Image (cartoon, rainbow, N blue to C red):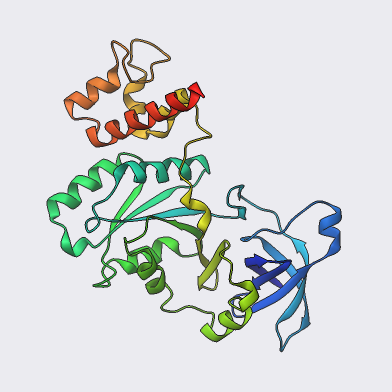
């Protein structure tokens, strides 16, 4: 039988096959070959007890992506959730999320929640700024259940990691997306939420037979330790159109003369909000290099 690992704790792997969750152990051959099953892995498994949903993983199918921190496989995209107001969005933090996901090779969907308390001008401004970053931008209201169908369409047949700060309605949106969840609550609680398995780990939630969202504690660390100062500009997509017009080929768009990116910011062609965040992150990376 084939399924997807949605959680792994203490040597047990919980495999969703589209309708049930099987508690599985992995064959000893994996340890011998130094291969560890990951949350998100598509696997083949033998059913040992159909009634009790007990199985044994026999094969890990080929991964199309793998993230090291947190350790998950086969993620297709990222959904970054922020509130458009209450709390006011921290755009520096949002840029960090975008950079982190781009580092992992994941296309990003930015979801601004609480659109019901925002003006059309605010929404249009953010749409222009962040679509220029290469992200898809959505406006929803979890309270009014507006825009959630659009999210579901974008998540369909994919595995999506969900990120965002606290207080923005992330849990409300995740709960709303599970409206037609294929796993019964009782089955989840009996197989995953038992006392000895309550430590927070990466966990996938099935919202359709082949559609998963990943809520993980690993995306709370947003330091840019793996980026060199000179590389940061590559993560600001809107700079690309102007970067080859700079006077110096190695321009980092900071204090150099003849910088076309800075000129584009002055002319309003590049968002000053994004550029100001870029400068803050650039300085952070420069300070880090000193030590």
Q: Which of 257 and 92 is in front in this view?
A: 92
Q: Residue at x 52, y 43 (%)?
A: 105
Instruction: Quadrant for the N terminus, please.
Output: bottom right
The reply, left or right, for residue 279 in relation to residue 88 is: right
Task: Choose between 126 and 291: the one closer to the eye.
Answer: 291
Q: Is residue 146 above or below residue 225?
A: below
- Residue that lies at the very extreme toward the bottom in this rendered image: 51
Camera-nearest residue between 287 and 213 = 287
The spot of residue 86 in percent (x, y) is 22, 59
Residue 154 picture quarter: bottom left
* Residue 80 pos. (x, y %): 39, 54
How far from the left and from the top, in percent, is residue 136? 34, 50
Q: How many marks?
A: 0
Drawn side of residue 159 relative to residue 17, left or right: left
Horizontally, residue 23 falls left or right of residue 169, namely right
Going 37% across and 55% down the picture, which residue do you hit? 165
Residue at image position (28%, 18%) is 260
At horizontal 47% and vertical 43% (from top left) the residue drawn is 100
The quarter of the displayed image where residue 193 is located: bottom right
Question: Can the viewer see residue 272?
Answer: yes
Depicted 252 relative to depicted 161: above or below? above
Which quadrant of the figure has residue 244?
top left
Judge whether residue 16 can be spotted in this image: no
Left or right, residue 179 beside residue 213: left
> Residue 48: percent from the left, percent from the top?
79, 81
Judge whether 76 appears above or below 237 on screen: below
User: Is residue 154 placed above or below 291 in the rendered structure?
Assistant: below
């Amino acid at each position: 039988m084939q399924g997807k690992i949605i959680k792994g704790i203490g040597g047990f792997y919980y495999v969703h096959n589209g309708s049930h969750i099987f508690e599985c152990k992995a064959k000893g051959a994996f340890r011998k070959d130094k291969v560890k099953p990951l949350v998100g892995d598509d696997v083949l498994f033998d059913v040992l007890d159909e009634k009790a949903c007990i199985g044994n993983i026999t094969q890990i199918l080929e991964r199309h992506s793998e993230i090291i921190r947190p350790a998950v496989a086969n993620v297709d995209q990222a959904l970054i959730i922020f509130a458009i107001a209450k709390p006011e969005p921290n755009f520096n933090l949002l840029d960090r999320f975008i950079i982190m996901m781009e580092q992992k090779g994941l296309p990003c969907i930015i979801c601004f929640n609480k659109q019901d308390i925002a003006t059309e001008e605010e929404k249009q401004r953010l749409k222009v700024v962040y679509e220029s970053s290469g992200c898809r931008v959505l406006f929803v209201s979890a309270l009014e259940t507006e825009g959630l169908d659009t999210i579901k369409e974008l998540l369909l047949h994919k595995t999506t990691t969900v990120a965002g700060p606290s207080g923005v309605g992330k849990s409300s949106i995740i709960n709303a997306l599970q409206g037609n969840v294929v796993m019964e609550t009782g089955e989840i609680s009996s197989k995953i939420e038992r006392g000895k398995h309550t430590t927070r780990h990466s966990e996938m939630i099935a919202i359709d037979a082949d559609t998963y969202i990943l809520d993980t504690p690993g995306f709370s660390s947003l330091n840019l330790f793996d980026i060199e100062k000179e590389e940061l500009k590559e993560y600001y997509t809107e700079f690309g159109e102007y970067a080859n017009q700079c006077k110096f080929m190695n321009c980092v768009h900071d204090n150099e003369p003849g910088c076309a990116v800075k000129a584009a910011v002055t002319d309003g062609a590049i968002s000053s909000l994004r550029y100001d965040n870029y400068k803050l992150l650039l300085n952070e990376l420069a300070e880090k290099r000193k030590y």
